[in-house]
Image (cartoon, rainbow, N blue to C red):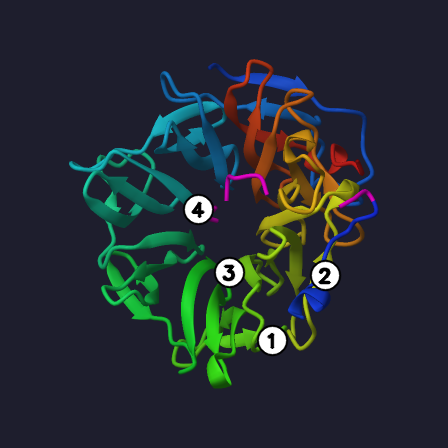
Amino acid sequence: MAAALTALVSLALAFTTPAQARAQGPARVQGPAPARAQTAGPRPCTPSITVLASLPGASAGAVTDLGRGRTAVGSSAGKPVYWRGTRVHAVPLPAGYTGGTVEAVNRHGLMVGTLSGPGRGPAPFSYRPGARAVTLLPGGGYAKDVDDRGRIVGYRHEADGRVTGVEWWGRTIRGELAVPAHVRVEEVTGINNAGQIVGSGYGEGEEYAGYHVALLWSADRSAPARELPPVHPGDTYSSYAPRDIDDRGRMAGTFSYSRAMESAGLHWAPPYTEEPLWLAPPGGRTSATLEDISPSSGVAVGTVGDSPITGPWPPDTAPPEQAQYWPGAGSALVLPRLAPEGASAAYAVGDDDRVGGRATDASGRVRPVIWTCASRQAYQP
């Protein structure tokens, strides 16, 4: 679910499409009037932005995933935490580790994430609320997602620079994720309850015609990852990075065009024979991401901003980044800010019409937040 926290010409949307590119206490803020999103919440709710508590002295934090009920997970002051309602709980850190984040939580409360510490490489872990200690997963690396059966996925960097996709089960490595001979893994980012896993990789074509590509592993772990369209050997400027996959196999991710530092949300759908749906950044902006897709409703969320190269110019005239909301059809929308000029970003969405992320308040503090009844707050800028 993990996640990118940095803000990524013209109002006529001078944006290169994928096809073109190949050449300190809790508070509650009432949301705006019911908006134009088409997805209704599963039960009555009050549109609002709930500010979650932070660790003592913390000035920053973010929600990275949403669990059942009023559970959320993420980070505060650079440390892994979870919330029950608005109350924050620190995940106990093993000796030698000073920070990290909880990346994901399943419906049974099992949390996974990555720890960090001085002189230590990244350490994947799992944790259950109330336990005295985390479980460190073998092999090192990053734990990025967990399904409802407890299968954990992520990746690690090898000594020779390669990246290996990994699946853990309990305290053991269940297996390494196979890829075609000409492809190397860049990231592994999501798993659904059908056992499908998504990530991104780099393929090598003839005469060094490399390309970035979306990868999908089936529930059959003996099969190598499938390369999803588009595949454009020789185009090393365009990347296609799925971030999550829902229980129907729909995927949300981001297209990035490095030459112009532009990006857009992408949506893949079975049977994956066509190129993904490209979502224009709302409001004529030039960059956007999709970071998460809900388990079954089809809603996806991310962040919208602007390219520092293509506009607006000078870059410091661009509005702050803003949380993005896509109802699963039609145009991408945005969610209201916590403060009129405050930046925001969305990293998690649930079937219960909640969206999690971060937002800057009127005093300039970055706060972990949840948009409740988000479909009724989303609007076209």
Of pointers 1 and 2, the one earlier in the residue sequence: 2
Q: Which of pointers 2 and 3 indicates the residue nearer the eye?
A: 2
Density class for disc 3 (Cα within 10 Å; few <14, some 14-19, many ≥20) is many
Q: Is 199 rendered above or below residue 312? A: below
Q: Is residue 5 magenta?
A: yes
Tell me, yes or no, whether the two marked residues, 2 and 3, touch with CB atoms within 8 Å.
no
Q: Which residue lies furthest to the bottom in this view?
A: 206
Q: Residue furthest left?
A: 95
Residue, x 62% and y 24% (percent of image)? 342
Using the rendered image of the protein, determine whether residue 302 is visible from the camera's viewpoint.
yes
- Amino acid type for the residue under numbered disc 2: Thr
Disc 4: which residue: 104
Question: Within the image, what quadrant is residue 306 found in?
Answer: top right
Of pointers 3 and 1, the one earlier in the residue sequence: 3
Q: Where is residue 217 in the image (x, y as percent from the top left)?
A: 47, 72
Of pointers 3 and 4, the one earlier in the residue sequence: 4
